[in-house]
Image: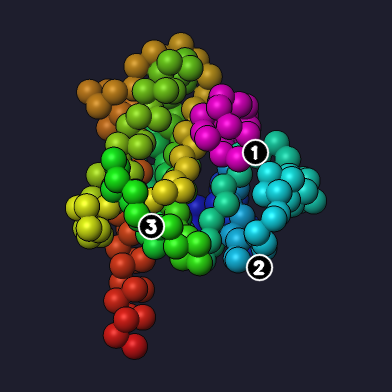
Amino acid sequence: MTPAHVHLDRPWLSFGLGSPHQVLSWTLNRPGFVMADKVVWREVRNADLPKDLDVHDWLSRELTARGEENSVAFLTSRAIERFHCADAQVGETKAFAIATVGLSNAERVGHRQPPHPLSYGTINVAAQVSSSLTEAGLLEAMSIVVQARTAAVMDANVPLRSGKATGTGTDCVAVATPPGDTMYAGLHTEIGEALGRVVYDAVLAGAQEWKTEQEVRINA
């Protein structure tokens, strides 16, 4: 069942945070530390992004047309309805993650595969935690989310010439928390455990679904 704060309106997927949160990401439209109350995905196809297109300008116009210019936005070539959610509570800390996972653009960290412009895929993850964090705490939380993403991809076992894939060449992550004074969010904390669990579960489910689709396509 899709949570009430997640809304699919193809080619858009939106994740409402419930209130203004500090969000850390490297998204095209609002990278770095920003305040936002929503994270959105925009599904794209090759026809949406011709060779000479200014993608930043195009995305800005798309967001403005929907009144989403203050949202943190991902672009994905994954079929937008193929998203996966996970939630967890550890002690007093609640966490939620939503991920879209495509691995046709898979890479292993420290190596580069030849690019395949017609086969781009990506992993986009948005994670929210109830604990209020400082900017330093949010940076540590980001490290946990990225670690969980990587662990899930490795456990999905996507082989490359250089070894198991650890992600894709175009992954993007956004982490949202209320602003506050908690400085630490490592693996020994409730925050780290809850965040790591939901991101791992959502990304692994997405990676396994993607692999199953490829096997069906090959055997069709």
Residue assigned mark 2: 47
* Residue sitting farthest toward the front: 114
Label 3 packing within 10 angstroms: few (<14), some (14-19), many (20+): few
Residue assigned mark 3: 114
> Which residue is found at the position 56% from the left and 24% from the top?
33
Q: How is the image coloured?
A: rainbow
Dot 3: what SS? loop
**Hey, what amino acid is under mark 1?**
Asn
* Near-viewer residue (106 or 147): 106
Which span of residues is magenta-colored? 16-37
Spatial distance from mark 3 to mark 1, Cα to Cα?
27 Å
> Which residue is found at the position 61% from the left and 44% from the top?
73
* Near-viewer residue (47 or 19): 47
> What x and y, as percent, mark residue 142?
40, 30
Residue 16 visible: no
> Which image quarter is the N terminus in?
bottom left
**Hey, what amino acid is under mark 3?**
Pro
Among the 4 quarters of the image, the one containing residue 45: bottom right
Q: Marks 3 and 2: CB-CB under 8 Å?
A: no
Among the 4 quarters of the image, the one containing residue 213: bottom left
**Hey, what amino acid is under mark 2?**
Ala
**Is tag 3's residue or tag 1's residue first in the polypeptide sequence?**
1
Disc assigned to residue 29 = 1
